[in-house]
Image (cartoon, rainbow, N blue to C red):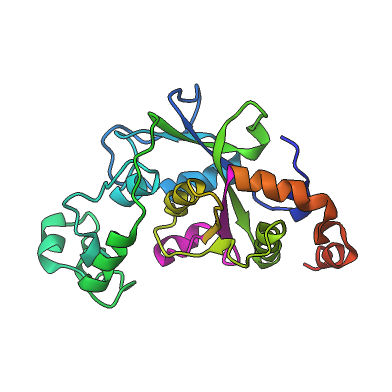
Amino acid sequence: MNSQLVEALKLKMQPVAIILTDDKPEDGLHFKEGSRRGCVASLLVAASRKGRQAYFDRKSFGCPGGGTGLGFGDCYGEFPIDSLLSTGNKEVADQMGNSGSSFMLEGERFYKDREKAGKWVDSLPLTDVPTKYVVFKPWEQLTEQDEAELIVFFVNADQLSALVVMSDFNRGTNMSVTAPFGAACQSILFGFSEAKKENPASVIGFFDISKRSIVDRETLTFTVPYNMFREMEAGVQDSFLKMHVWQKLQERQ
């Protein structure tokens, strides 16, 4: 699909559309039913880098954080996510044996204690998508007929700067971007929440330290509700993206 915005950014990794549908792709990456070890963020990266579609449903979403991030409700259940994100839980680590016990034993230390991690869990904008599948579709395969919910960009600092500016180009509110912490895939969840609002914000993400290694060190994600993407697209022709200052910035390595 053609886009002046995408063209102007000179992206190394192509954007990925998040599509809600009751029809799964004929050929797409997906996890085995019941798997709890798959990483949604890894398939998001694969969709961008390798041009492979991926799809998920309520029986094949990988880890609990992934299911939650995809909008399949609260998939944590009895899983002690507050312990994992903070100082760990020896009892649970012993029960897990060799299946990730070291992470649970010491915790990831993203929050000071279980109470703070629990507050983060309570803050999540949980949602239950109305469709059977959530599909990741690479930009090069996207058509005008596709009804995307979100567009996820993988960007460096210059490209991120451009998208931040374009988010507010037609508004002038200085309130058009948010950057919440979550699992690497959970900007999708925050994006779903923003998409429901009259004036949605774009979501900067991929702050999950445990998954930063699957992207280049300068890369973050920028997730945009599709209606907001169209708003940004409409402003490109009259924006700085057509000016010398942006063109000059593109020349540096």
Q: Could you tell me residue 120's position as x and y percent?
A: 31, 65
Q: Could you tell me residue 90's position as x and y percent?
A: 13, 68
Q: Could you tell me residue 32's position as x and y percent?
A: 33, 33
Residue 246 in the magenta stretch? The answer is no
Please determine whether, in this image, residue 62 is positioned above or below residue 11. above
Side (left or right) of 234 relative to 52:
right
**In the picture, which quadrant includes the C terminus?**
bottom right
Residue 223 in the magenta stretch? The answer is yes
Front-most of residues 224 and 93? 224
Side (left or right) of 154 relative to 63:
right
Residue sitting at x 23%, y 64%: 82
- The magenta region covers 205-226
Place residue 56 in its image quadrant: top left
From where the camera sits, is residue 6 visible? Answer: no
Residue sitting at x 44%, y 53%: 190
Please determine whether, in this image, residue 79 is positioned above or below residue 15. below
Front-most of residues 7 and 39? 7
Q: Could you tell me residue 70's position as x and y percent?
A: 40, 44
